[in-house]
Amino acid sequence: MYNIIFVGAPGAGKGTQASMVAKKLNLVHISSGDLFRQALEQGTRLGKQAKTYMERGVLVPDEITIQMVMEQLSAPDGENGVILDGFPRNLPQAEALDSALDRQGKAINKVVSIMVSEAELIKRLSGRWLCRQCQTVYNAVNSPPRVAGKCDKCGGELYQRPDDKPETVQKRLDVYFAETAPLIEYYRRQGKLLEIEGEGSVEEVTRRIVSALPAEKLATR
Ligand code: AMP
């Protein structure tokens, strides 16, 4: 069992890397942002609750977020372990996660922190396009799709996230540095932190992450 958290500022490549590493290691990928976006698209009660917070680039309240992620964590298909992407995002969420896992006799094994400079984050976020169907991320400058507006993998329609507008991007970065960055110290103190340089190609960064993860855990899956 290998439970890993991915932490990184918006635009650090956290979602892309979480999805690549989950496939390679056969782990379930749980993205809180994707869960909220799906709920929003489907117009569910959860989506309606999350909408105004997401539009402003601030965090959805903890009681809503924690319940949503815990439901996913108790789904039976995660027996190899999970990659949590975008959760936890503040200390109360991290503490709630630790005690919920503890009650199930489980724990977080490693925390991957992806580090990218603020200038690079802003550049990446402003050119970001996502597939509506499979959530693959493209960048107009660094990694454009082969056909404009279409996903290379599934042919789905590409769209820009409404919260990637410049004012909201700045707000999301501020929220990250104020509320989420303190988690890095929390996990460093627990001896679980792996700091990974996030600039370079997607494949290079994936290789760095996989080779930083202790092999004895991989062998037991
Ligand atoms: P993301 O795709 O991870 O950038 O998340 C998009 C938006 O969803 C964030 O700006 C928040 O409004 C909301 N969100 C995602 N994960 C969380 C979380 N763990 N806690 C609170 N809000 C979240």
Image (cartoon, rainbow, N blue to C red):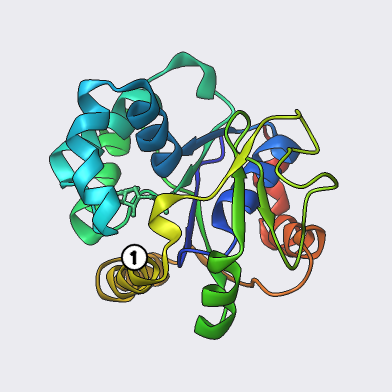
- Which residue is rendered at x = 52% and y = 24% of the image? 78
- How far from the left and from the top, in percent, is residue 52? 20, 46
- Which residue is rendered at x = 74% and y = 57% of the image? 206
In front of the other: 97 or 1: 97
- Which residue is rendered at x = 63% and y = 31% of the image? 134
- Which residue type carries mark 1? Thr
- Which residue is rendered at x = 60% and y = 69% of the image? 124
Q: Let me know if residue 94 appears in the view.
A: no
In front of the other: 206 or 143: 143
> Hey, which residue is sitting farthest right in the picture?
146
Q: To which residue does mark 1 refer?
A: 168
How dense is the environment of label 1, judged by Cα within 10 Å: few (below 14), some, or many (20 and up)? some
Residue 106 vs residue 122: left or right?
left
Q: Let me know if residue 159 appears in the view.
A: yes
- Relative to 76, residue 158 above or below: below
Residue 208 vs residue 133: left or right?
right
Residue 66 vs residue 34: left or right?
left
In the rendered image, which quarter is residue 182 located in? bottom left
The quadrant in which the C terminus is found is top right
The quadrant in which the N terminus is found is top right
Q: Element under label 1?
A: helix
- Relative to 54, residue 100 above or below: above
Q: How many marks?
A: 1
- How far from the left and from the top, in percent, is residue 193? 49, 66
- How far from the left and from the top, in percent, is residue 115? 56, 74
- How far from the left and from the top, in percent, is residue 220? 68, 35
- Relative to 150, residue 145 above or below: below
- Relative to 43, residue 214 above or below: below
Quick check: is the Cβ at mark 1 less than 8 Å away from ligand 1? no
